Every structure is written in C-alpha cells, then in structure tokens.
Image: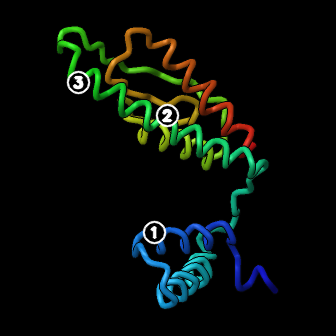
C-alpha cells in the first residue's frame, strides 16, 4: 500500500529537498508544494522505473557524497592554480582510458557524472560494451595515476554502493 503512494522514497526525498533549495524558502506553501511534487512525480514516472536500483550500502552513498564534494572543492582550487600560475606550455592534457569493474548502469552513470563534476576532468565516451570510459584531463603529467585514483577513489566506492 505504501509503495503505491511512495514508489521511490529516495527520489521523493530528493525532489522535496531540491524544490526547497530552489525556492530558498521554508514557508508552509513551499513545503506543501515540495511534498506534492515529491509524491506526484514518482507516481507519474513509476512505469519508467521497472527495475528500481537498490543501494546495497546507503551509508556508503552518504560517504561517497562527501568524498565527491571535497574533491570538487579541491579540484576547483587546483584548476584555478593551474590556469593562473602554470604557463600554457607546461600544461599536460591527456586522454585516459579507464577500464571499468562496475557493471550496473547506475554505477557507471554515477562514475561518469562524478568525473565530469570534478573540475579538470570530463568523461567523454563509454565503450560499446560498457567496460571502459574515456576521460579527458586538463593536466595529467601521470595519466596512470589519474586512472588509478578514479578507480580507487570513486569506482571502488560505487561498487560497494551498487553491486
């Protein structure tokens, strides 16, 4: 019965929080509208989510969020320092092929999004078989180190969360 009105609780919670952040208000009408959105949108989109992804470890997902937020702040500083202080001839951009151990579409999407959200890197392509992702790095004097960092810092955690 509850799943009929709340088919995707995490999505509902995310929609409520996102709406309240967008309107930047905790007035009663904003909260009521956020709850309505959080209930109606998941019910309307239920048919498009036949296999709802399951988080194996929700606490790991919270940890992952903080790791990514920290890395985004750190990368912003690193990119700013590169752009301001490093001569253009010393910047070493690189294309890096990162082999993937994760197989779930949700984990691959989260990894590609994380790479793109982190300044200085962007995920550009996914192999047809889903076993590798192509990443462009603004400054990669050691591409293997960046590949290893992506695998150990992000992919390992996503594997624990989704698989």
Query: Mark 3 touching mark 2, by CB under 8 A?
Result: no
Nearest the eye: 32 or 36: 32
Q: Position of residue 102 (x, y in %)?
A: 66, 35
Q: Is residue 161 above or below residue 37?
A: above
Residue at the disc numbered 3: 83
Q: Quadrant location of the N terminus?
A: bottom right
For label 1, the residue is: 21
Q: Is residue 124 visible to us here? A: no
For the residues labelled 1 and 3, the Cα–Cα distance comes to 32 Å
Q: Quadrant of residue 17?
A: bottom right
Q: Quadrant of the C terminus?
A: top right
Q: Tell me the residue at 57%/18% (across/down).
A: 148
- Residue at 62% x, 32% y is 155
Q: Earlier in the sequence, mark 3 or mark 2?
A: 2
Image-based side of 17 in relation to 116, left or right: right
Query: Whole-Å distance between the Cαs marked 1 and 2?
Result: 22 Å
Residue at image coords 41%, 30%: 75
- In the image: residue 122, left or right of residue 88: right
Residue that numbered label 2 is attached to: 71
């Amino acid at each position: 019965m509850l799943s009929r009105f709340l088919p995707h609780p995490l999505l509902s919670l995310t929609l409520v929080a996102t709406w309240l952040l967008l309107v930047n208000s905790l007035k009663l009408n904003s909260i009521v509208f956020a709850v309505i959105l959080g209930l109606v949108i998941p019910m309307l989109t239920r048919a498009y989510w036949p296999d709802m992804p399951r988080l194996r470890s929700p606490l790991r997902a919270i940890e992952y969020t903080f790791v990514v937020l920290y890395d985004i702040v750190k990368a912003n500083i690193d990119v700013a320092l590169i752009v301001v202080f490093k001569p253009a001839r010393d910047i070493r951009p690189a294309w890096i092929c990162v082999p993937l151990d994760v197989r779930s579409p949700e984990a691959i999407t989260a990894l590609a999004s994380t790479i793109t959200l982190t300044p200085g890197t962007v995920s550009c392509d996914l192999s047809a078989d889903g076993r590798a992702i192509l990443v462009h790095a603004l400054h990669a004097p050691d591409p293997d180190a960046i590949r290893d960092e992506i695998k150990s810092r992000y992919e390992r955690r996503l594997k624990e969360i989704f698989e």
